[in-house]
Image (tube, helix red, strand yellow):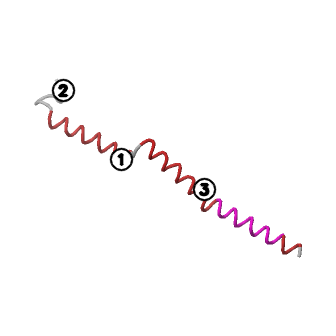
Amino acid sequence: MHIILKSLRYALWLLFCFFRHVVFLPAAFGGVLLLARLVLGHPVSDLNDLLQKEATAWRTAPPGHYMWE
């Protein structure tokens, strides 16, 4: 009986470790990434906004404004 209980305890410990490393840790890491994205904003959309502003500034600038003198 002692061997069966010890084996069961070992199997449950392995299952717990498997759950912790395969399910919980990636989910926690994904939550941290999601929180960082919410706090800092999406970098691609920020880059697109910057490029749109530069393109608009380039189109609306007076002639010769961006040329080296």
Magenta span dominant secondary structure: helix
Q: Residue 2, how many percent across, how many down? A: 89, 72
Q: Nearer the viewer, residue 39 or 26?
A: 39
Q: Secondary structure at mark 3?
A: helix
On the rendered image, what quadrant is the C terminus found in? top left
> At 30% from the left edge and 45% from the top edge, which residue is drawn?
48
Sequence-first tag of 2 and 3? 3
Sequence-first tag of 1 and 2? 1
Task: Identify which amino acid the numbered label 3 is placed on.
Answer: Leu
Per the rendering, the mark at residue 68 is: 2
Q: Is residue 17 magenta?
A: yes
Q: Is residue 3 left or right of residue 31?
A: right
Per the rendering, the mark at residue 25 is: 3
Q: Residues within 10 Å of mark 3 (few under 14, many from 20)?
A: few
Q: Are marks 2 and 3 in contact (CB under 8 Å)?
A: no
Q: Which residue is mark 1?
A: 44
Q: Which residues are magenta?
A: 6-20
Q: Secondary structure at mark 2?
A: loop
Q: Residues within 10 Å of mark 2 (few under 14, many from 20)?
A: few
